[in-house]
Amino acid sequence: MGTIIDITNDFPGNFDTNIKITEIKLKSNATSYTGMVYDWSSHSMHGSYIDFPGHIKETDNGERADNFPHERLYRVPCSVIRLNRKSGSGAVSAKDLEKAFGGVPDTPSLLINALGKKEPDEVETRSVFLDDSALDWIIASGARMLVSDIYESQALHGVFLRLFEAGVSTVCEPRGLSRIKDSRVFLTVLFQKIPVVTQIPCRMIVETMN
């Protein structure tokens, strides 16, 4: 087993105030103890979260959190592309991605660290983004799972629409991508099998291959 890196974003800082805790007293002739049960309401974009194509109504392909194929979630070979773009630096192109990776990836998942050591909330919102050529390149590579610290532009030019039309699921709001030094890793995405939903908070684990 290689090095394990958790690239999951935390839930909002005040989320714990939303949690109701119920203490249940349990007792028998043999023992007694207190069970702790939790109730909360959540949002599908809390922390890191995965979007299936059905997150956009027009591109719904029927994939849900409860039926998404497990083999596309566990220890999936993943290519890692590293850039170091500044806030406000605009479009990332196919040429940028291919140069950074040193070719075209051939793995079923893809991870783009476009912001270097910066996190998505440390740059101007959507001021660094994937352009149309980058989307063509990602889709043509055959990857069907994309983890990235950049996606859409401020102009809303259709990044998610294009990816979902091609059957690419996206994971948003990762953290600490710069800790990944290898160009190929295993990616695991974890979440509950909740029915109906096409967007759900998730946990992401990266495992190096050596």
Image (cartoon, rainbow, N blue to C red):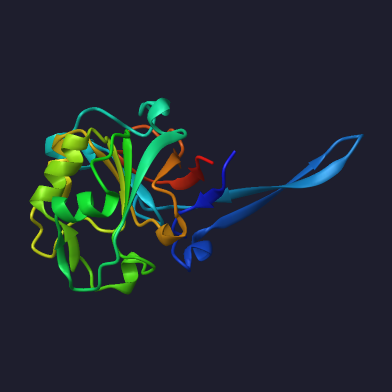
Question: Is 8 positioned to the left or the right of 137 in the image?
Answer: right
- Whole-percent x and y of residue 23? 69, 51
Query: Looking at the image, which residue sits at the far front?
Result: 102
Residue depicted at x 41% and y 34%: 76
Which of these two is toward me, 117 or 151? 117
Residue depicted at x 8% and y 55%: 157
Q: Quadrant of the C terminus?
A: top right
Q: Quadrant of residue 163?
A: top left
Query: Looking at the image, which residue sits at the far right?
Result: 29
Count of numbered circles in the view: 0
Which of these two is toward me, 16 or 52? 52
- Whole-percent x and y of residue 55? 23, 42
Is 117 placed above or below 59 here? below
Which of these two is toward me, 51 or 137? 137
Question: Is 172 positioned to the left or the right of 137 in the image?
Answer: right
- Whole-percent x and y of residue 178? 41, 61
Q: Quadrant of residue 196?
A: top left
Which of these two is toward me, 69 or 17? 69
Question: Is 56 positioned to the left or the right of 41 in the image?
Answer: left
Q: Quadrant of the N terminus?
A: top right
Is 150 placed above or below 203 here? below
Is 83 placed above or below 137 here? below
- Whole-percent x and y of residue 22? 64, 52
Residue depicted at x 48% and y 63%: 15
